[in-house]
Amino acid sequence: MDLYQLRGFYEIVREQSFTRAAEKLFLTQPAISLQIKALETELQEMLLERNRRQIRLTPAGEILFLHARDIFARLEEAYSDIAALKSVLRGRLAIGTSDTNCTYILPGLLAEFRARHPEVELDIRNRMSPEVGNLVLNDEVEFGLATLPVKHRDLVGEALFERRDVLICPPDHALGKRKRVGLKQVAEHPFLALERGSTSRQLLDELFRQQGLELQVEMNLGGIEILKRYVEIGLGIALVPEVAVEEEVAAGKLHALQVNGLVKRKIGLVEHKGRRRSQATTAFLDLLEEFVAAGKI
């Protein structure tokens, strides 16, 4: 089996497009189509079902894709290990994490990593925490940084740091003079929430259910920055990571309160069980530990 043909098949499935896969591999579309035809002839099995909207794997195609994914993951490790023999770390590092981590936690860390290892290509995929787990499972990223725990037998999680949420409101809000409130007081006011599907929203809904309370959700929104802006103009109150509102609180645009009964969330490393770490991954995690130890995260 030709490795180039296998790469063509693998990229078509990942990109869900012959055209995009061909562009990624610097091939013409007829050339990559011929690669698939050659594979199917060799294996005497159809690998892909094509229609105008999507590309589906046949049973034989599913088997081949799983093996191809493992093969190219191992090749990536080999490239990283060989590069590590040289003085300059090279390779590609793909990380899955949430919008919150991308915006408020990682910028300084990524800047320092780039300064130390300029030859490493960084690929940051920002997704909700449950989706980060899927990226790791599918070997689309080397590891994830997400809210723990992870709930899959093939994933392992390791807590790295904690994140505290605070309640935010406009300074002239009824809660604007309070320093601390209970969950019952939170439930008494119009609330702006992250959309369903995020781990943050799941944990919040479960906490209020356990207390026999119900949030007055006025709007479901797609990100922390939107929540902050809408709270600032008086559309409701919201729970957000404390690190996300430090500037607004200091500038007097928002007021932040501690909430009784609200536990800190553990943010941690999510890895595929048994997968060997690349040199780039090891270097990044070593730097992350430095930042955590120094209180920079």
Image (cartoon, helix red, strand yellow):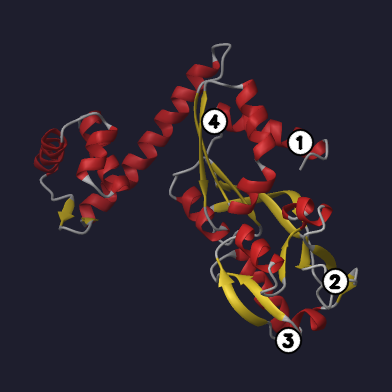
- Dot 2 amino acid type: Gly
Residues at circles 4 and 3 in contact by the CB criterion of under 8 Å: no
Single out the mark in the foreground, 3 or 2.
Answer: 2
For marks 4 and 1, give the CA distance: 20 Å
> Which mark sits nearer the N-terminus, 4 or 2?
2
Q: Residue at x 76, y 43 (%)?
A: 297
Q: Position of residue 281 (x, y in %)?
A: 58, 33
Label 3 crowd bin: few (<14), some (14–19), many (20+), radius 10 Å: some
In the picture as drawn, the residue positioned furthest to the top comes out as 87
Single out the mark in the foreground, 2 or 1.
Answer: 2
Pointer 3: what residue? 213
> Which mark sits nearer the N-terminus, 4 or 3?
3
Nearer to the camera, 205 or 227:
227
For marks 4 and 3, give the CA distance: 46 Å
Pointer 1: what residue? 291
Label 1 crowd bin: few (<14), some (14–19), many (20+), radius 10 Å: some
Pointer 4: what residue? 278
> Which mark sits nearer the N-terminus, 1 or 3?
3
Q: Residue at x 69, y 75 (%)?
A: 236
Q: Position of residue 68 (x, y in %)?
A: 32, 40
Identify whether 170 is placed above or below 127. Answer: below
